[in-house]
Image (cartoon, rainbow, N blue to C red):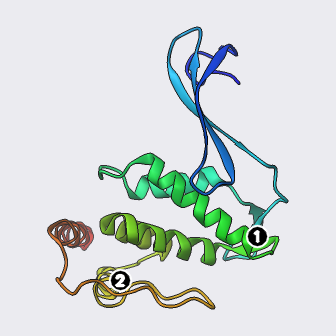
Amino acid sequence: MRCPYCGSDESRVVDSRDSESGDAVRRRRECLECDRRYTTYERVEDVPLVVVKRDGREEMFARAKLLNGLLRACEKRSVDRERLERAVDEIETEVRQGGRDRVSTQEVGERALRALREIDKVAYVRFASVYRQFDDLEQFQRELARLEEAGADPLPGEEPLPGLDGTGLDGELEALVTERRHNVTRQTP
């Protein structure tokens, strides 16, 4: 295993344990050259999973791509990267347990939204605004109202997500709405 910092292939395993989902072995390693630590995962090689895009194109499922999308949504939020990695593990496991070799980007996206809704509501709205391709402020406001009232639409065969506790938008969501309003106002000629 090469060190991601210095490229050395000399390292030692500091800690080794099963991942929470049980489908991988998580290893903390220490580079013997630069003394920095990094994490690796050992997984059983699965049958390839194909993701069908909205326009019909197909590509291989990429954990890193999903994780990067969640990381971008959580930027400048106090969300632990390991929590997002667990969410990606759970999403991938759920999709693979369906027994299919193809899955739509819609299903992956909805599962990501469900995970983010439990992790961080502001990150949920950020991800939804890109994933659902909001074109204007009204679509953004409708999604906020939907989040506040009932949560995301259920996936086929699943129960709807429970609604919020009814206390209304928190301060950070209100700030995000205000920021979006300001950006839309600035862009209008």
Amino acid at circle 1: Arg
Question: Residue most toward the top?
Answer: 33
Q: Position of residue 156 (x, y in %)?
A: 62, 90
User: Which residue appears at 69% of the width and 71% of the height?
Assistant: 95
Closer to the camera, 26 or 116? 26
For residue 153, side relative to residue 139 (left or right): right
Q: Given this view, does label 1 or label 2 mark the residue nearer the observer?
A: 2
What residue did someone put label 1 on? 57
Q: Residue 97 bears which disc, if any? A: none
Amino acid at circle 2: Glu
User: Which residue appears at 65% of the width and 54% of the height?
Assistant: 22
Give whichever of discs 1 and 2 has the lower sequence position: 1
Give the answer, above or below, for where 32 lies relative to 52: above
What residue did someone put label 2 on? 143
Label 2 packing within 10 angstroms: few (<14), some (14-19), many (20+): some
Q: Position of residue 118 (x, y in %)?
A: 39, 70
Can residue 52 be seen?
no
Quadrant containing the C terminus is: bottom left
For residue 99, side relative to residue 130 (left or right): right
* Number of numbered markers: 2
Say which quarter of the image contains residue 116: bottom left
> Disc 2 on helix, strand or loop?
helix
User: Which residue appears at 66% of the width and 77% of the height?
Assistant: 54
Give the answer, above or below, for where 134 lies relative to 19: below
